[in-house]
Image (spheres, rainbow, N blue to C red):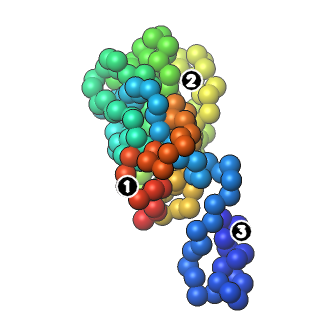
Amino acid sequence: IIAEAVLLCSPIYLNQTSLPLCVPGEPESQPLAFAKDTMLWASPANAGAQVLAEEIATTFAGLTVSTAEEAGDATHMLLYLNADTWSDERLAEQVKQAREDKLKIVMAHENDPDKGGCIFARFFETTPQELITDGLYRDMAHPCFPRAWPHHEVSLVLLAKAIGATATKGLHARASAGGPPKGG
């Protein structure tokens, strides 16, 4: 982002609005897909989780999303953290059960105020104490940035990697045609 901004200020690129730069090793430069069966559970008690899970599944090939009341055959649980996360009491019980069942929980921290984004400290006030004491937040929550922000795509890549996506050599790793998702 910085390199692009600097180049766009130079005389040769003044008429451009963006440049197709690729920095080797940066997260969004690697095509990713799910090599083995991966099912992400987005609990209906976790408002917003289904929308994010479906965005990840449509961006990266090989991910199935479940929105059932229970985890079932899911390999991962998406815990979508925003201002309303713990408003449904069922979610705390589902997270406790997922932890008991050793289901990998991938946490996504919403940063868009229009989607209930809030500072992470709020979760230490709203999360059931039993889950905090048991270490729910020992693992890092991945930030989710608004679609219009340049970091939105990186958010999706980091979440996909946390769920199990791996780099592929083919150009068809993205579930949607046309390559990486575009902000908008």
At horizontal 53% and vertical 40% (from top left) the residue drawn is 168
Residue type beneath disc 1: Ala
At horizontal 38% and vertical 46% (from top left) the residue drawn is 175
Q: Secondary structure at mark 1?
A: loop
Query: Between tags 3 and 2, which lies in front?
Result: 3
Cα–Cα span, label 3 and label 2: 37 Å
The residue singled out by tag 2 in the image is 136
Residue 3 shows which numbered tag? 3
Cα–Cα span, label 2 and label 1: 36 Å
Q: Quadrant of the C terminus?
A: bottom left
Local packing at callout 2 (Cα closer than 10 Å; few below 14, some 14-19, many 20+) is: some
Give the percent coordinates (x, y) of residue 63: 39, 34
Which one is earlier in the sequence, the residue at label 2 or at label 1? Answer: 2
Residue 157 shows which numbered tag? none
Q: Is residue 68 above or below residue 184?
A: above
Q: Nearer the viewer, residue 118 or 22?
A: 22
Q: Is residue 182 above or below residue 128?
A: below
Q: Secondary structure at mark 2?
A: helix
Q: Nearer the viewer, residue 92 or 24?
A: 24
Give the percent coordinates (x, y) of residue 85: 42, 36
Cα–Cα span, label 1 and label 3: 27 Å
Local packing at callout 3 (Cα closer than 10 Å; few below 14, some 14-19, many 20+) is: few
Mark 1 and 3 residues: CB-CB less than 8 Å, in contact? no
Q: Nearer the viewer, residue 111 or 153?
A: 153
Give the percent coordinates (x, y) of residue 115: 42, 51
